[in-house]
């Protein structure tokens, strides 16, 4: 069997869902399980409703919910035959009525807890999966809608819940495998799950890719396909460099680094379950299904070019800890990291000198409390509006002078580099710059390293 995941733009309206139907129909003989995201922007809109309700703007929250309801109704009218629509519309309306009630509750209490946020955010995938399943069935495809909350078991860390693999795999075998055996095409929402008590959870923004990989690993898929709105993983975000090239094949390790450092095309956790079982992952374009996309595999073929791609992660804060009192004391780094651990704030890039340590974290509201704790034994400064740039390629291993070329290119654009780290995996060069310089830095570096004369035609298209 295979897993086919379709992102928000791939299910954004009736035309897009019609294309998805055609793509899935062409793969029926491979026993697809279909995973869908919420319709494009639906999750953003649901979370905006929650914030509006929380702020007491009940009417504007309900108005946004009304717009989302109309959008789903419109797509249902265009996609679903009369008979099926007679059962689908009451189901959609029951969900939307429950959504309205939830928003009224949030507005009455002025309280939006992570748990209610998950209940709210989950409607996007619940609704899109129902709609897509009905659209498939109306076209004669033997689809079966399956609520992912009956399969994806997570812990209770709402908004970033962690999948529990043994429980999830058992549920997948019990609920999905029989449908496949009957020749049905299960259609499931990504992103959403439930804890062991059945309370709705979500696994983090962009998490439908991760759901697809979890389902693929649990069901021993031979392939996981991530269908999106670009031709594959590209040498950089094509919105920043329109001349970005498609990467034909990339290793799990390279793809994971790129995803982690901001290549939004793939959720960073996606490759984990796939690596464990060595299941190839493909990134494909639902607007251009003839394109072969990007294949992510265990071992990528040798590549003559230095780098595979450049990614950027914005909204970064640098925290600088200067501990003259602790000069040369052992246990000093451990003490610092214990405080980060206590505040549950993960660190991305670290650089140390004898008396100071600089670390980067995603900008978040927990930083002042963290800084206060750190300041008990050190001087602490923090500065937001930074970005991490990460350049990845297995070919840079054992190649001298690569970093010099990177920083010379940046110097030509007078781009100030604040921190540098060459990954211990030796497949990346990572550095921190001002957030507003990201596009310019990427354009400079892409121009330097991805000229047609520089790149390996067997790897890039
Ligand atoms: P989906 O809704 O299908 O999950 P996303 O918006 O999450 O799609 O991811 C696709 C987007 O990722 C692309 O439209 C592109 O702008 C962005 N992106 C960022 N970096 C890259 C990259 N290296 N290659 C391809 N796309 C990238
Ligand atoms: N709909 C969710 C989001 O927008 C999950 C996803 O699309 O992957 O974050
Ligand atoms: Mg995505």
Image: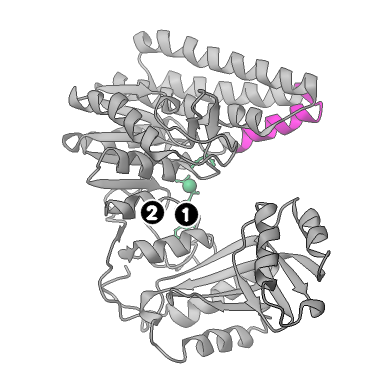
User: For this view, does 173 lie left or right of residue 104?
Assistant: left
Q: Specify the quadrant that holds the N terminus.
A: top left
Q: Residues within 10 Å of mark 1 (few under 14, many from 20)?
A: many
Residue 289 on image: x %, y %: 30, 47
Q: Which residues are magenta?
A: 44-58
Residue 47 magenta-highlighted = yes
**Residue at position x 37%, y 37% from top?**
166
Label 2 neighbourhood size at 10 Å, few (<14), some (14-19), many (20+)?
Answer: many
- In the depicted structure, whether residue 160 falls above or below residue 401: above
Q: Secondary structure at mark 2?
A: helix
On screen, 331 above or below 100?
Answer: below
Question: Can residue 148 be found in the magenta stretch?
Answer: no
Badge 1 is on which residue? 268
Q: Horizontally, is 337 left or right of 247 in the view?
A: right
Outermost residue, front side: 330
Looking at this view, is 163 or 182 the one in front?
Answer: 163
């Amino acid at each position: 069997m295979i897993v086919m995941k379709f992102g928000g733009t791939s299910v954004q309206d009736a035309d897009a869902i019609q294309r998805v139907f055609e793509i899935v129909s062409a793969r029926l003989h491979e026993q697809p399980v279909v995973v869908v995201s919420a319709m494009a922007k639906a999750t953003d809109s649901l979370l905006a409703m929650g914030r509006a309700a929380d702020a007491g703007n009940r009417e504007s929250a309900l108005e946004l919910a009304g717009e989302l309801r109309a959008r789903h109704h419109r797509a249902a009218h265009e996609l679903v035959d009369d008979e099926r629509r007679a059962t689908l519309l009451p189901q959609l309306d029951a969900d939307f009525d429950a959504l309205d009630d939830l928003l009224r509750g949030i507005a009455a209490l002025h309280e939006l807890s992570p748990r209610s946020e998950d209940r709210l955010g989950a409607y996007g995938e619940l609704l899109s999966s129902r709609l897509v399943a009905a659209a498939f069935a109306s076209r004669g495809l033997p689809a079966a809608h399956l609520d992912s909350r009956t399969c994806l078991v997570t812990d209770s860390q709402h908004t970033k819940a962690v999948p529990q693999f043994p429980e999830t795999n058992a549920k997948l075998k019990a609920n999905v495998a029989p449908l496949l055996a009957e020749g049905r095409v299960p259609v499931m929402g990504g992103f959403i799950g439930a804890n062991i008590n059945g309370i709705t959870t979500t696994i983090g923004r962009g998490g439908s890719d991760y759901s697809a990989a979890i389902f693929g690993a649990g069901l021993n898929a031979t392939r996981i396909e991530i269908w999106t709105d670009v031709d594959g993983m590209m040498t950089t975000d094509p919105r920043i460099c329109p001349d970005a090239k498609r990467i034909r094949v990339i290793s799990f390790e390279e793809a994971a680094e790129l995803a982690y450092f901001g290549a939004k095309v793939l959720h960073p956790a996606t490759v984990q379950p796939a690596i464990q079982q060595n299941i190839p992952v493909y990134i494909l374009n639902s607007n251009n299904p003839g394109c072969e996309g990007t294949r992510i595999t265990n071992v990528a073929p040798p590549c003559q070019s230095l780098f595979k791609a450049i990614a950027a992660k914005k909204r970064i804060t640098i925290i600088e800890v200067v501990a003259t009192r602790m000069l040369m004391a052992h246990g000093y780094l451990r003490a610092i990291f214990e405080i980060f651990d206590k505040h549950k704030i993960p660190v991305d890039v670290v650089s140390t000198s004898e008396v100071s340590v600089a670390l980067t974290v995603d900008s978040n509201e927990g930083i002042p409390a963290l800084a206060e704790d750190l300041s008990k034994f050190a001087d602490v400064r923090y500065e937001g509006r930074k970005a991490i740039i990460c350049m990845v390629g297995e070919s840079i291993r054992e190649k001298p002078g690569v970093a010099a070329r990177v920083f010379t290119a940046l110097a030509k654009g007078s781009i100030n580099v604040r921190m540098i780290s060459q990954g211990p995996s030796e497949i990346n060069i990572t550095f921190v710059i001002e957030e507003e310089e990201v596009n310019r830095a990427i354009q400079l570096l892409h121009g330097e390293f991805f000229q047609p004369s520089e790149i390996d035609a067997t790897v890039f298209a």
